[in-house]
Image (cartoon, grey):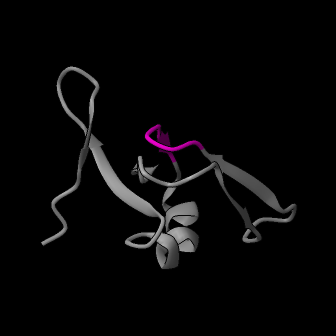
Amino acid sequence: MPFVMLRREWPSQFRRTLRSGKKPLTMTFPPGDAVEVTEKEFEELRPDVGQALMEVVLDEKGRARVANTA
């Protein structure tokens, strides 16, 4: 499953309501914390990736690193 992270310089938490399931799901992203999301959730968050959110991977020590999407 992919991880996304709100940019560290973002002034406050970022919230997004996802509506793909039967019940709406509100996700909260604190600045600088990696959050694991499902593939379906990631697809709904895709418009925010590159703006507020970044796709990240965890290194061997569990630290978030920006994913190489090239």
Q: Residue at x 43, y 69 (%)?
A: 49
Q: Residue at x 27, y 44 (%)?
A: 57
Q: Is residue 44 above or below residue 10?
A: below
Q: At 21% from the left edge and 20% from the top edge, which residue is drawn?
A: 61
The C terminus is located in which quarter? bottom left
Rendered position, 60 above or below 33: above
User: Furthest residue to the top?
Assistant: 61
The residues colored magenta run 30-36
The quadrant in which residue 14 appears is bottom right
Tag count: 0
> Which quarter of the figure has residue 34?
top left
Residue 54: x and y in percent read 37, 59
Is 47 drawn above or below residue 30 in the view shown? below
Q: Residue 31: horizontal and vertical position, in percent?
A: 50, 44
Please state if 3 lies on the left or on the right of 44 as rendered: left
Q: Position of residue 59 (x, y in %)?
A: 19, 32
Name, please, the residue furthest toward the right.
23
Residue 22 lies, in percent from the top left, at 85, 65
| Residue 14 left/right relative to 54 | right
The reply, left or right, for residue 46 in relation to residue 62 is: right
Residue located 56% across and 53% down the image: 11
Left or right of 47: which side holds 68? left
Give the residue at the far left of this rendering: 70
Q: Nearer the viewer, residue 33 or 43?
A: 33
Q: Quadrant of residue 19?
A: bottom right
Magenta-drawn stretch contains 50: no
Q: Is residue 41 above or below residue 33?
A: below
